[in-house]
Each structure stands twice: as C-alpha cells, then as structure tokens.
Amino acid sequence: MVQMEVCANSLSSAIEAERGGAIRVELCDNLLEGGTTPSFAQIKLAKLMLKIEVYPIIRPRGGDFLYTDLEFDVMKADIIACRKLRCDGVVFGILTDKGDIDIKRCAELMKLAKPMQVTFHRAFDMCNDQFKALEQIISLGFSRILTSGGENNAIKGISRLSSLVEKAGTRISIMPGSGISIENITKIIAETGVKEFHGSARSTIAGKMKYKNAKLNMGEGRDEFAIEITNATTVKNLIELANSAE
C-alpha cells in the first residue's frame, strides 16, 4: 500500500487530509515560503481532533536553512512544545553555509525530539552532495527524507529519486514531494518504487467577504479573497492512483 502524507496549511486542511485517507499531515503555515512552524493552537487542536499522525514542521522562517543561534533556540523550544503535546513526529533540517548537513545541530534536535519520529525536509534538496547527506541523515536516526530529487519538482527529479531509493534500501524512507498531482503520481510511483509520497492536494475556494477593498493586497502574488485548502477528494484520488501504478 502506497501511503500519502499531506502538507496541510491549516487545521481545516488537516481535517480534509484525514477525510481523504492520508496517514499523516505535515502541519505548516506560510506555504508560499515553503512552510514555517504553525501556531501552538493549531498543533494542539490537530492532536485533539485528528486520528492520523501529526508532524509539525520546525522552521522559524522562510529562506535558507542556515540558522542563527536565536533561531536555533526557537527551533528547540518548538520541538519541546510538540513533544509535550504528544505529536507523533516533527520535520526539520539544518545546513552549514557550505551546503552540508549540520550534524551537530541536527543531533541536538534529534535528542530533544525523542520519542517522536523525525523527517528531514527539503533542506536536503539544497545539499551540495545528496548521497553523502543521505548517509549522514541515516546515521542521525531520521525516519524519512522529503525530497524532490534536488529539482524544482519531483517529476524533474525522478531519476535522482530512483537512485536515492535504491541507495537507501530499507534503511530510511525516501518520500517524494513538490508538484505531485493527479497527472504525474502514477509515473512517479512506477519509476521510483516509493512507498509513501507527499503533497498538498489543495484547491482554491472563494472567500465569503461581501465587501472587498480592491485597492490593496496583504500578500504578494495571491488573491486576497481566495482561500487555499486541501481537498479530501483529491487526496483520495491521489492515493488510488498511486496504488494503481505498475
């Protein structure tokens, strides 16, 4: 059975993910920045309301994955909060300025995260050597790696994804993500042989505001009066297609 993790941009999206058959949500805010740590309340309510696994992303800001001491302290505090809320896992990744895995800092966060499972996120796609990074991440004790194969999306990185799956064997799960859709999921599963995948399965719906001030926009490049939310039907369809791949 090929399983799906949904990148949920809100509690509402997480609920839709569960309805659609996802086994896990990576709970995030600010997907336009690649995802940042959600609020304490979102995490707490997700754990109260969902039966599936909840993995908050631990990322204090958008941008690169080289963090200041202050940002690292924030990450540590967020992991402790997730552990106290009995989250099933967390998602993080830290690099050095040269594009290597920051082994020391990742190891420190791994200790704080126990007994939660941990996913190394797409900071992996910014590494200078993914195969070297793969071995280091395995040695640190991560459960899985979320990756597009070092490309903008999983389809472009499909060859690298296949190589990573082969190299990893049963030691760690390689979970493709980025740009996965109804149109390409069958090809990705068939050519990589992965057992789980990651996607947001989002749809855009109209907001319910009757008055709209058309003179301003609160966020760049987006419709101020539209809402993006995971669609349970799309989740269900993706899982069915993934399991039909030969």
Image (spheres, rainbow, N blue to C red):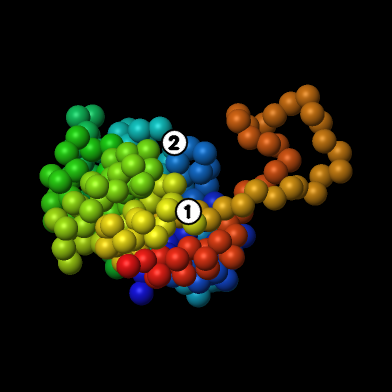
**Tag count:** 2
Residues marked 2 and 1 touching at CB (< 8 Å):
no
135 and 156: which is toward the camera: 156
Task: State the SS at label 2.
Answer: loop
State the quadrant of the N terminus: bottom left
Q: Quadrant of residue 46?
A: bottom right
Where's residue 174, x and y in %?
27, 57
Q: In percent of the image, x 44 and y 37: which residue is there?
A: 61
Q: Is residue 164 left or right of residue 25?
A: left
Q: In percent of the image, x 17 and y 66: which residue is there?
A: 170
Q: Residue furthest right?
A: 210
Three-letter amino acid code at the position of disc 2: Gly
Three-letter amino acid code at the position of disc 1: Glu
Q: Nearer the viewer, mark 2 or mark 1?
A: 1
Residue 145 appears in the rendering: yes
Earlier residue among tags 2 and 1: 2
For the residues labelled 2 and 1, the Cα–Cα distance comes to: 29 Å
Q: In percent of the image, x 28 and y 57: which residue is there?
A: 191
The relative height of residue 155 versus residue 232 in the rendered view (above or below) is: above
Q: Residue furthest top?
A: 215
Task: State the SS at label 1.
Answer: loop
Q: Is residue 14 left or right of residue 134?
A: right
State the quadrant of the C terminus: bottom left
Q: Is residue 128 left or right of residue 112?
A: left
Q: Which residue is mark 1?
A: 183
182 and 121: which is toward the camera: 182
Where's residue 112, x and y in %?
29, 57
Tag of residue 62: 2
